[in-house]
Image (cartoon, rainbow, N blue to C red):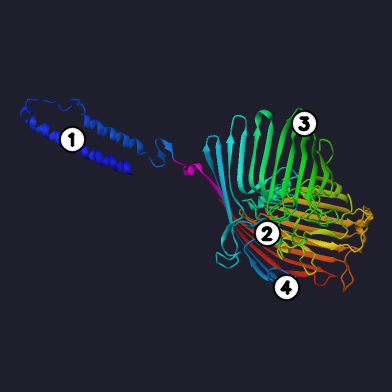
Amino acid sequence: MLKNYFTKVSSLLLCASCLGTNLYASAKSDSTSSQQNFASNAPQELGLVNSYLRSLKLRSAAKTNEFGYENGSKLGLFKNEINVSGTVRFLTIYRDMGDSYADMSTSKKNISFVDSPISNTGGFWSGYPMFELNIASKFSKHTDFNVGYSFINFMKGNASSDVPNSTLLTNMQNLRAGGTFHTAIGKFAFQAGSILPAKLSKFSMGQPIYRDDYFDRLPWDWYRNSFLRYEDYYNIKLNMGGQNEGRALFSGLTMNGNIIPLGLNFTALYGRSSQTAPYSTQTGAFFPSILYGGRLEKSLFTKDVNGKYAFNYYRREADVDNFSGIADNNQMMTLDADMQFKGLKLVGEVAFSQINNTVTDTFKVVPRELPPLHRSGIGFQLRADASRKLLPIPLSVDLYYIEKNVVSFDGSILNTNSNFRTSGIATENKYDQNLLNNVVQEIGQYANNRKGITLKSNFKIQKLSVDLGLMVSEEIENINDSTITIQHRVNSFTRSRFHAFFMEGGPYNRIRSVFRRAYENIAITQGNANNKKAFNAADVLLMYKTKIFGKDIVLMNYHTYSTATSHINLMNNFSNDAYTRQYYVDATIAFKAMKKVMVVANAGYEKLLGGVNTVKDKVSGGTVNQRGKSLGFGLDYDFLSTAGLHLRHKWFSHEDVNFSLDKFNGTETTLELKLFF
């Protein structure tokens, strides 16, 4: 602006000088002006002053470009060069109960605007966001970037900014930025911030896969067409699973890329995950807690085989507390491969793992003056998938052997080892979400201190899709004869919110509540240290798609039966000698009533029986004998191609015949509005 002012003043002074000169020249030449004859169209030569004024004008024009440019160069990004996307999600859950647990953290009549109570993990207030935003663009032809942000409202009813759990808006550790660089030798990308979905391998860093019923909506449901979710489940067996399925939630810095001349892909990360951050409200801020790792992957393509193999490294470094300097570390190194042959696919992983902390194998704490203990373990998994090219029906055979010290906070191996705790050894049992002693796992899941085999098959009979599964596993050594851990499959989401993230809930302190799931510990009263406990499961999933009144309808029916026994014995699976026997069934109907309207209905039933060698009620003298039920209906209205309204209503109940305090019943209504942009 100052430069423009100077230009204007200079011009005025020069004009004044020019005017004086012209007046003087005019007076002097009056006597001779009549003698001169200038043709009106003759070219005239510019004087020195006029030339200077024109140069000022040209310079001013060159520097006064259109908006967004300077000297011919862009000053930023235009709106058509920026891609903005995200979701907005409004949720209301109303629960009205008759019988209930006395220790519930909410009242019988409860209204909530979040899926699960917002928790403090590692000093970060976290919960599933109501708003997610991502902005992506390019710095140049070979470089792009993205920035993401999300937040949630605490919904606690106190607007004071200095009160924890107030109605302040906060982020969900989800402020991130990243970029991609394209070069002649490959593509390289980085992301920084949180939360960054990260994966190395199944054992080292990746989530276990659970089966969710398709009635309750998941917060991260990405479908704009509600009925398409059920069609995909029927056609391609697409189970939505957890958000960023198979990936751990990570905060920090990640880099990945490929080196084309060498045929290599790589991943590197540094930071910490939701499982390695210390629980500051329960165990104190025992910092540092740092995670780093990497993956180096090589692709293989030949005439007979194509696939990949890789080396993975995962390490978590932390202290027991924030003042002693005593280590609480673990690390894992693995080799994994995924190879496709003609009609046969082989997938496997071999792992070596180490634990370095202050807890002995008998679960006693080492005195501070002594060095921490070092323990190690090995494990492997090998799966062979044979297609119809080799067998009449597809068959998958999965073998695994995983020792007790093969552990990772962020891996897909369920942890049964008590001297390894979520967020650190200082975490108390009642807050450790991932310690599952003698867990009866779902088919397809892995647990440490376990060896076993899983068989799966799927085929179609006209429009009927059939999936079969069978799992048999056994302890490698008997390290705990105190409890069996089972997962409640019916009303799991409802149960998980009674006393969220607490592992000794319910009237008998047996309920373990984690995110969207609930487990229960069944105490063993008469174990046998010489025996190795066995865990078995079988399941059947039937799906059928047809039309009614010209409208598409998908029917789904799932059955599973699982047991825990003192040792491998086929007959014990069906007798009272088993520690636990559990049967679960659900049925779901999805009907596309109109182009934008879908109706869904669901019914579930669960039965759990404790054996003669498990805990008995002091009054009735009987063992665990539970029944759980649910019945629900829902309506999905996709009123826009990018927005939908989703209603669910459910009746639920639970009762133990012998433990009189273990009962609850009621209704739950969920209304969700979700918009994508």
Q: CA distance from mark 3 to mark 4?
A: 61 Å
Q: Secondary structure at mark 4?
A: loop
The magenta span reads 75-85
Residue 280: assigned label: 2
What number is the disc on residue 282?
none
Q: CA distance from mark 2 to mark 4?
A: 35 Å
Crowding around mark 3 (Cα neighbors within 10 Å: few <14, some 14 to 19, many 20+) is some
Label 1 neighbour load within 10 Å: few <14, some 14-19, many 20+: some
Taking the image as drawn, is residue 131 in sight? no
**SS label for mark 3:** loop
- For residue 18, the mark is 1
Front-most of residues 650 and 186: 186
Earlier-in-chain disc, 3 versus 4: 4
Q: Amino acid at mark 1?
A: Cys
Dot 1 or dot 2, earlier in sequence: 1
Q: Nearer the viewer, mark 1 or mark 3?
A: 1
Disc 1 and disc 3: Cα gap in Å?
88 Å
Q: Residue at x 92, y 64 (%)?
A: 612
Q: SS of the residue at dot 2?
A: helix
Which residue lies under the disc numbered 4?
Answer: 98
Q: Kindly identify the amino acid type of the residue bearing the numbered disc 4.
A: Gly
Give the percent coordinates (x, y) of residue 305: 77, 31
In the displayed orientation, state which residue is furthest to the bottom.
619
Mark 3 or mark 2: which comes first in sequence?
Answer: 2
Between 673 and 555, the residue placed more toward the observer is: 673
Q: Amino acid at mark 2?
A: Ser
